[in-house]
Amino acid sequence: MSRAEAAGDALRHQFQYAVSRLGTATALRAIDEAWGGGYYLVDPQAETDPEAADEAFGGDELVIDVQTHYIARHRAQAPGVEGIMWFIRNVAPDRWEGLDPEIHLDLGNYLRHIFLESETAAAVLTCTPGDDDHSILTNPEVAATRELIDRLAGTGRLINHSIVHPNAPGELDRLGSLIEHNRPSGWKVYTIQGWGDQPGWRLDDEESGLPFLESSRELGVGIVCAHKGLSALAPAGSPADIGPAAASFPDINFLVYHSGYETPVDDEEEGPYDDSEPAGTDRLIKSLADAGIGPGGNVYAELGSTWFVLVRRPREAAHVLGKLLKAVGEDNVLWGSDSIWYGSPQPLIDAFRAFQIPEELRQLHGYPELTPRIKEKILGLNAARVYGIDPDLTRSRVAADDLSWVKAAFDEYMAK
């Protein structure tokens, strides 16, 4: 073997190790040690023994990912893609050199990452804001993806949102048509999305938010998913409007995507709840407290991208998860990965299974222990309830699935 071939083999071995559960174990143990221990409970043998790694990270929870994305290849040059690439690189600046949206973030990779490389049983396909000329997927394309998967894999593996811009002229008049043609399981809204000379809007404002919620109620749409946080601190990205809106519309479930979390600046991190100058998820918690919305109410906290950032910041992760569980309850925290922006969500699933809020923080702040039952709820059972997914039926379909439909779906998509 030549020196170049040997070097190539060594690189391939390193890559295979890094993307395996052995690599996940090594990374999590190193993070845990750096932060003082007690966060990731991983057997040292899991770094070198595949069986030990599977034992450390294995689980039989029903995993339902309520926030997933891909970019249509024919839209890889759309203006909205630039914003997505900025967001991905801002969240993990050193990780995504050479990432090409047309090659790495298309439907083929979506199917591979979500359904082949992870234990995700069902997923919600959602999208970014903007009109059809700017978006990475249109509402009809999102619905068509669900229909394709339904036909090839059976119903239930993929459900979809429709993106709504309540501050856009005439949008509320189109809601009925969106329901008829796209059959969404709920709306997805971005209050940070400006329109015309408006920089954004609020769910509780009289011009856009309240008329939108009233129309949703009249049309029988009971799920509103709002992007809150991850907004570079834009005022309209704050979750301060969630509490008032939820109190005014108790028959609508508000799913707060990202839970109001903001990516850290200058190594700042969230600590215990502080309502004097609330930031990050504290803004959501204060909004709910002020509006009288308690645990088990009609507000849900979602973890997409939030968990990705927190994995390597376990002390902050303990505070954020602990605070959210106290504020909305163990039945109202939802698993989301924001994949495929970060590749396969399986390392995120494995990290969540291994994570624990240390006893010291639980005693100091009243955070709950992350029991197997609570993790089972967060990873899938809560989403199953709110989205009307039958857990037993979904488990049986996954158990009988040979996944041949993934290749068929990709081939049919690429033939268009």
Image (cartoon, rainbow, N blue to C red):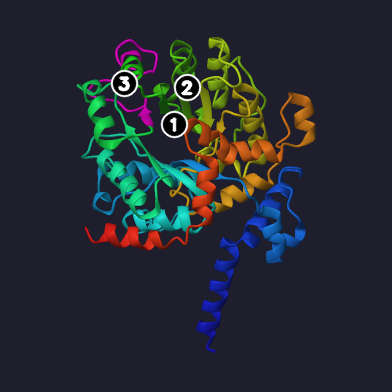
Asked if residue 265 shows in the view, the reply is: no
Asked if residue 388 shows in the view, the reply is: yes
**The one of 82 and 332 positioned closer to us in this rendering:** 332
Q: Secondary structure at mark 1?
A: loop
First reached walking from the N terminus: tag 1 or tag 3: 3
Q: Locate residue 67, reporting x and y percent.
A: 45, 40
Q: Please give the name of the residue rendered at 51% of the width and 36% of the height, measured from the top-left corner.
A: 384
Question: In the rendered view, does 259 fall on the left or right side of 270?
Answer: left
Residue under pointer 2: 239
Of discs 1 and 2, which sits in the foreground?
2
Q: Which residue range is magenta in the image?
A: 186-211
Given the image, on which type of amino acid does mark 1 rest? Ala
How busy is the neighbourhood of tag 3: few (under 14 within 10 Å), some, or many (20 plus)? few
Q: Secondary structure at mark 2?
A: helix
Q: Is residue 255 above or below residue 245?
A: below
- Which picture quadrant has residue 3? bottom right
Q: Locate residue 308, reporting x and y percent.
A: 54, 44
Q: CA distance from mark 1 to mark 2?
A: 13 Å
Report the predominant secondary structure element of the magenta stretch: loop
How busy is the neighbourhood of tag 2: few (under 14 within 10 Å), some, or many (20 plus)? many
Residue 193 inside the magenta-drawn segment: yes
- Which picture quadrant has residue 184? top left
Q: Please give the name of the residue rendered at 45% of the width and 44% of the height, measured from the top-left corner.
A: 123
Residue under pointer 3: 219
Given the image, on which type of amino acid does mark 3 rest? Leu
First reached walking from the N terminus: tag 2 or tag 3: 3
Q: Locate residue 347, reporting x and y percent.
A: 58, 52
Q: CA distance from mark 1 to mark 3?
A: 33 Å
What label does residue 232 carry, if any? Answer: 1
**The one of 416 and 226 positioned closer to us in this rendering:** 416
**Quadrant of the frame with the N terminus:** bottom right
